[in-house]
Image (cartoon, rainbow, N blue to C red):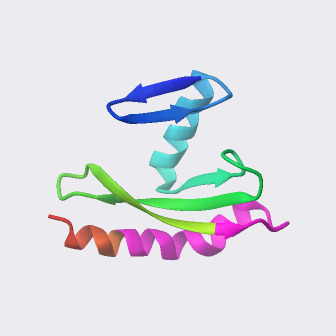
Amino acid sequence: MILASGCSVFVHHDGKAALVAELGKVRRTGIAVNDEELDIALRSIAAPVRSRSGEVVAAVNVAIAWSPVPMSELVGQLGPALRAAARQITCWVI
């Protein structure tokens, strides 16, 4: 499924309900993950950078070389620092 919004295109192979559920999880946790969904061995974790109004205007992303470590463990290890960095950057956004 491809959903277009403005100039952005999102590809989600599991259907609209799965995409909406994943976006809800991202909103709750403040972390988005890519666990080889775009390419083999490409994994990443991202946190939003917000404007003063709360709108997401950018993201901080950490790319991770493939490893056998479960993504949930990587998020547990790296997520807090990534969210903290995104919050710090948010303080500088006008």
Image side of residue 93 versus residue 82, left or right: left
**Which one is in front, 87 or 94?**
94
Q: Residue extending furthest left?
A: 94
**Residue 70 placement: quadrant:** bottom right
Lateral position of residue 8 relative to residue 50, left or right: right
- The residue sitting at the right extreme is 68
Q: Is residue 5 left or right of residue 73?
A: left
For the point 26% across and 49% down, which residue is it?
55
How many badges with numbers are in the image?
0
Residue at 60%, 67% in the rendered image: 63
Please give left or right for residue 3 compared with residue 49 in the image: right
Asked if 81 appears above or below 43 in the picture, the reply is below
| Rendered view: 38 above or below 10 | below
In the rendering, at what x and y percent does residue 80 appear?
Answer: 52, 72
The quadrant in which residue 18 appears is top right
What x and y, as percent, mark residue 28? 48, 49
Q: Which residues are magenta?
A: 64-86
Based on the picture, tell me whether residue 76 belongs to the magenta stretch: yes
Q: Quadrant of the C terminus?
A: bottom left
The image quadrant where one finds the N terminus is: top right
Viewer-nearest residue: 77 or 41: 41
Q: Residue at x 38, y 69 (%)?
A: 86
**3 or 28: which is nearer to us?**
3
* Main SS of residues in magenta: helix
**Relative height, residue 20 to residue 93 (above, below):** above
Q: In the image, residue 2 lies at what x, y percent?
A: 54, 25
Asked if residue 81 is among those painted magenta in the image, a careful observer would answer yes
Q: Residue at x 22, y 57 (%)?
A: 51
Q: Position of residue 15 (x, y in %)?
A: 63, 23
